[in-house]
Amino acid sequence: MVVGIVVVIIVAVGIGGAILLKSDAGPIDLRSENEINLGHENNGAIIRVSVGAAVIIRLPENPSTGFTWQYTVNENILEVVGDNYIGPENAIPGAGGTRVLKFNVIGSGDGEVNMNYVRPWENQPIDHFSVILRAE
């Protein structure tokens, strides 16, 4: 009997760029994309990008709970050009929104983005997001 393993990479085209899911098959090659949109489904991914590309990360956030996304990036590879919170569409008290980070890829190499969802006065994050952008 032959047993095989199939790895599926799903790539969908969204508004203004590619939306992709994480693949355990190695780096995902998006060097042909000018704008790359990422979310929680890409956590832990290695993505090949071109110098000059824009990378947008959207993650759910609810600052009314005290939790916000804090992040670090390799500033030799990635330039932060946007960091915005977009509130919920409806004005329900306590409803969460979306943190939107935008980076320009400005250099070659591995630009890692590490993000922790944490209250500033606490040491333990309740969520984590990381991605490696391999710029060429």
Image (cartoon, rainbow, N blue to C red):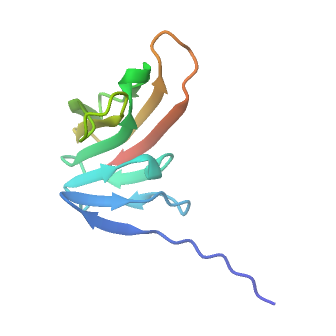
| Residue 85 versus residue 90 in the image, above or below | above
| Residue 9 versus residue 127 in the image, above or below | below
**Residue 92 position by quadrant:** top left
Q: Residue furthest right?
A: 1
Relative placement, left or right, of 100 versus 26 is left
Count the marks: how many? 0
Instruction: Identify which residue is drawn at 47% across, 17% down.
Output: 119
Whether residue 52 is visible, yes or no, is yes
Q: Name the spot of residue 51 as percent of width and height, x first.
A: 23, 47
Q: Residue furthest top?
A: 121
**Residue 17 position by quadrant:** bottom left
Q: Residue furthest front?
A: 92
Instruction: Identify which residue is drawn at 37% across, 24% down.
Output: 63
Relative placement, left or right, of 130 versus 18 is right
| Residue 93 versus residue 1 in the image, above or below | above
Judge by depth and name the residue closer to the eye, 126 or 78: 126
Judge by depth and name the residue closer to the eye, 95 or 24: 95
Instruction: Identify which residue is drawn at 25% across, 34% down.
Output: 91
Q: On the rendered image, what quadrant is the N terminus found in?
A: bottom right
Whether residue 136 is visible, yes or no, is no
Q: Name the spot of residue 58 as percent of width and height, x first.
A: 32, 43
Relative placement, left or right, of 125 versus 49 is right
Q: Name the spot of residue 7 as percent of width and height, x first.
A: 56, 71
Judge by depth and name the residue closer to the eye, 66 or 32: 66
Q: Name the spot of residue 38 as percent of width and height, x first.
A: 35, 49
Q: Residue furthest bottom?
A: 1
Judge by depth and name the residue closer to the eye, 63 or 16: 63
